[in-house]
Image (cartoon, rainbow, N blue to C red):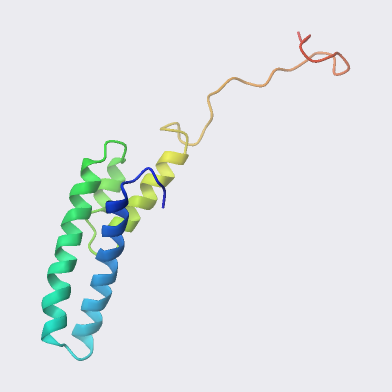
Amino acid sequence: MDSRHPRSLRVAARIELISLIVMLANVFTVHLAPVSSLTGPTHGCAYLFVVIATWRLRRAPATAKALALVPGVGGLLALRRSDRAGTAGAGTGGRSYGRAPSVRSDPSAPPGRGL
């Protein structure tokens, strides 16, 4: 994860995934009512927080905002997509449009005395 995202979003994305795992493990094994009553609302609140926080990030791409809607892993996927988009060259598709390196006509010429 990257520090460009609010820490609360990163924590909520992890809580969302962990609470879903605990909730599903409880349902498919012993199905304890206290565990269900704790993990259900925890997962729901974390999910809503992740969705709203991701949609409020101005620099998050549209695909990250859509991925945040996936229950359980959506927050982590959205963070990963945002990180990937942020390191890809700020909307240039990974291409660098900076200044091209200078080419000297005579390799033996001292630097600074190019073409």
Residue 74 in view, yes or no: no
x 24%, y 59%: residue: 70
| Vertical position of residue 25 compared to residue 103: above or below | below
Horizontal side of 80 relative to 113 (left or right) equals left
* Nearest the eye: 54 or 7: 7
Query: Image quarter for residue 71?
Result: bottom left
Horizontal side of 36 relative to 106 (left or right) equals left
Q: Position of residue 53 (x, y in %)?
A: 22, 47
Query: Image quarter for residue 105?
Result: top right
The outermost residue toward the bottom is: 30
Q: Position of residue 89 (x, y in %)?
A: 47, 34
Horizontal side of 66 relative to 44 (left or right) equals right
x 25%, y 49%: residue: 66
x 27%, y 53%: residue: 8
| Vertical position of residue 12 compared to residue 99: above or below | below
Q: Position of residue 81 (x, y in %)?
A: 37, 48
* Nearest the eye: 52 or 8: 8
| Vertical position of residue 69 compared to residue 41: above or below | above
Q: Position of residue 112 (x, y in %)?
A: 76, 11
Which quadrant is the C terminus positioned in?
top right
x 14%, y 72%: residue: 40
The outermost residue toward the right is: 108
* Nearest the eye: 29 or 36: 36
Horizontal side of 100 relative to 48 (left or right) equals right
